[in-house]
């Protein structure tokens, strides 16, 4: 059965249900939680370093291949075998350009991911906040001009009601799975944006985080905030070490703790945020 969200993503495995989910655990992803909002990190430092070096090595190797190809003087082939070899070398160069095109965003998003790319859920206002590298996603087609802005970021507020989870795989032999939040037009299944919720994980493991976030948003006791890295009474320390200096707008930091829609509206009016 295909995904109900359109357009369907390449590598789709299944749609993730909202609401109460007993398959739940914050694992080591829960940075901070109180009665108003919770903060989950989406990028482990160990994964960030690993993929940073893998992408850098691939860029170096295939960049070197391209350099070698263009440094060899071009001569007309003298026979059929040389013509075939020339075509093979050309195909290799084209493949090298494609790999570099794919690896540069991977390199950027690991180099410029900050403090785990936290995603913040306010369950009293039903809002979700992200502050992430522009390259922290699974897109393939990109405007090469964006490569000139490696530190470009996306900082946005979303409605939880418009976010829907899907699982995709990466076609590897290791059964790696990613959970994606589909941002839909209100009241529809038409996707207008995507958010990487939980990157490459083994098997069903990533769905534990999805289950925990859902339980938290419906105030279910299975979402235990005591398992966070920062205790609930250390909100100031959490903000100082994770939030401050990371480009979060002041209004958004206040909005983390908003308890009603009216309070959120007052905060936006205070900072003259366009609705």
Image (cartoon, helix red, strand yellow):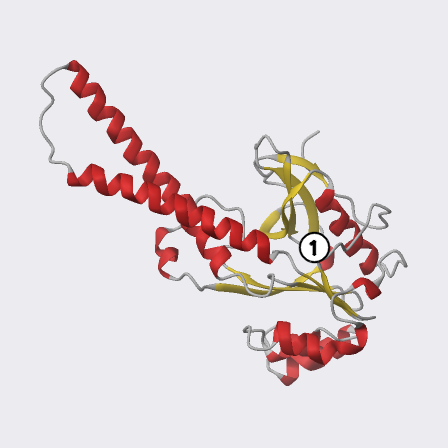
Q: Residues within 10 Å of mark 1 (few under 14, many from 20)?
A: some
In this rendering, position of residue 211 left or right of residue 152 = right
Q: Quadrant of the N terminus?
A: top right
Q: Residue 139 at what x, y percent from top left?
A: 50, 46
- At 59% from the left edge and 81% from the top edge, which residue is drawn? 272
Q: Position of residue 78 (x, y in %)?
A: 9, 18
- Residue that sits furthest to the right in the current view: 221
Quarter of the picture holding the C terminus: bottom right
Which residue is rendered at x = 80% and y = 71% of the image? 36
Which residue occupies the foreground of this view, 182 or 94? 94
- The picture quadrant where one finds residue 116 is bottom right
Image quarter of residue 220 = bottom right
Residue at label 1? Answer: 162
The foreground one among 177 and 46 is 46
How many numbered discs? 1
Closer to us: 45 or 178: 45
Q: Residue 203: x and y, percent?
A: 70, 38
Could you tell whether 124 is left or right of 206 in the image? Answer: right
Check the image and report above or below for 80 versus 233.
Answer: above
User: In the figure, 181 relative to 33: above or below?
Assistant: above
Residue shown at the point (47%, 59%) measured from the top left: 111
* Circle 1 SS class: helix
Q: Is residue 166 left or right of residue 213?
A: left
**Residue at the outermost bottom position:** 270
């Amino acid at each position: 059965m295909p995904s109900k969200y359109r357009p369907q993503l390449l590598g789709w495995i299944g749609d993730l249900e909202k609401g109460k989910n007993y398959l739940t655990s914050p694992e080591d992803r829960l940075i901070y939680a109180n009665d108003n909002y919770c903060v989950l990190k989406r990028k482990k430092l160990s994964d960030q370093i690993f993929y940073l070096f893998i992408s850098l090595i691939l860029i170096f190797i295939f960049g070197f291949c391209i350099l070698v190809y263009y440094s060899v003087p071009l001569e007309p082939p003298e026979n059929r075998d040389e013509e075939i070899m020339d075509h093979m070398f050309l195909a290799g160069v084209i493949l090298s350009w494609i790999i570099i095109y794919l690896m540069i965003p991977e390199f950027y998003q690991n180099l410029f991911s900050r403090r785990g790319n936290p995603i913040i859920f306010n369950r009293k206002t039903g809002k979700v906040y992200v502050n992430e590298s522009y390259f922290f996603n699974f897109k393939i087609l990109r405007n090469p001009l964006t490569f000139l802005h490696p530190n470009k970021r996306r900082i946005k507020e979303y409605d939880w009601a418009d976010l829907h989870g899907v699982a995709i795989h990466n076609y590897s032999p290791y059964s790696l799975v990613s959970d994606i939040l589909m941002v839909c037009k209100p009241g529809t299944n038409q996707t207008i944006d995507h958010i990487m919720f939980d990157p490459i994980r083994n098997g069903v493991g990533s769905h534990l985080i999805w289950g925990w976030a859902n339980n938290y948003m419906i105030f279910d006791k299975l979402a235990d905030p005591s398992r966070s890295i920062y205790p609930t009474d250390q909100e100031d320390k959490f903000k100082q070490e994770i939030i401050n200096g990371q480009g979060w707008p002041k209004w958004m930091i206040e909005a983390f703790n908003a308890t009603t829609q009216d309070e959120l509206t007052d905060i936006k009016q205070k900072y003259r945020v366009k609705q």
